[in-house]
Image (cartoon, helix red, strand yellow):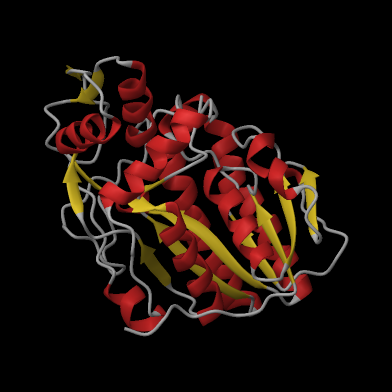
Amino acid sequence: MASPLTRNWDHAVVTGGAGFVGSHLCAALLDAGAAVTCVDDFSTGRPENVAPLLDRPGFTLVRGNVSEGLTVDRKPDLILHFASPASPADYLRLPLHTMDTGSLGTRNALDLAHRSGARFVLASTSEVYGDPQQNPQDERYWGHVNPVGPRSVYDEAKRFGEALTTAHAEAKGTDTGIVRLFNTYGPRMRGHDGRAVPTFVRQALAGEPLTVTGDGRQTRSLCYVDDTVRGILAAAAHGMRGPVNIGNPSEITMLDLARLVVRLAGSSSEIRFIERPTDDPAVRCPDITLARDKLGWEPQVDAEEGLSRTIDWFRTTAGA
């Protein structure tokens, strides 16, 4: 298969750049020779995620809320809109902020892209598929979503963001793209952000019971962050407008994931079953045919390798 598409960028703006995925994007763009402006309000992003980048030539950190406006000192040719609470613990704590970021924040980022003639890529999510009745999910699937459920502030903010991005391209000719990210994991996740991988890793390393929701038969598809970043940048380089799934098509149950983390961590932790959250999807698995065919991209890091790297990071970092 062909290598993922690449492109040389002059100046990239990454909103949410101090977050988990955003900080990895900032580093990858700097490594590729681009100047990077990271915009973050630190509502969920962390200063330590970008601390190693502060002394690198071409990196600028701007503290700001994109829903209140977005201006930068230097004209960008790429805008990656990754600002948004992304874990259930965060968007349930910040419901209105999540919706403002997905609506007003997306509009402000799109307007900057249009003024600058920049390529714009929206970070969307597999959550737009809701609790899917089709498995795996391809980009043509419209989803099965509860618009007023507890997860709706995130689901609907991203669905609206996709609609707004599409409308901006149609009405103004803005160069836009949409990436639908499936469950991504790796270093720099917060141990208490409520997502399965950091929760399990934190519990396993502490010798605590791993809390599996429901009966643990629900599935997720886990993509290591380095693979996700390669996919995002390939989508940015391609110029495609429509949404593209970026995720790992290897499906795993939450119970099997918990057992795998225990084994890789060398932990003696037991498994404890707890109540499953409302509207928690039963399955989640991407069809990545489009990404393979158009972008030359597919994941390279398997679960054992990716989880081992993640566990090693948590061992040496607070990760909380």
Give 313 or 49, whichever is nearer the viewer.
313
Q: Is residue 68 left or right of residue 173?
A: right
Which residue is at a point 15% across and 37% down the rendered structure image?
A: 256
Which residue is at a point 53% across and 69% down the rendered structure image?
A: 233
Q: Is residue 302 left or right of residue 38?
A: left
User: What is the total number of numbered labels drawn onto the structure image?
Assistant: 0
**Residue 159 appearing in the image:** no
Give the x, y percent position of residue 185.
40, 45
Give 106 or 84, whichever is nearer the viewer.
84
Q: Is residue 145 left or right of residue 24?
A: left
> In terms of image quadrants, where is residue 204?
top left
153, above or below 71, in the image:
above
Give the x, y percent position of residue 76.
76, 69
> In terms of image quadrants, where is residue 68?
top right
Q: Looking at this view, name the residue that lies furthest to the right.
A: 73
239, above or below 301, in the image:
below
86, above or below 251, in the image:
above
Give 54 or 99, whichever is nearer the viewer.
54
Which residue is at a point 30% across and 46% down the rendered structure image?
A: 145
**Residue 118 appearing in the image:** yes
Q: Looking at this view, name the residue that lies furthest to the bottom.
A: 2
Give the x, y percent position of residue 119.
64, 74
Give the x, y percent position of residue 59.
78, 56
* Image quarter in which the N terminus is found: bottom left
Give 163 or 124, whichever is nearer the viewer.
124
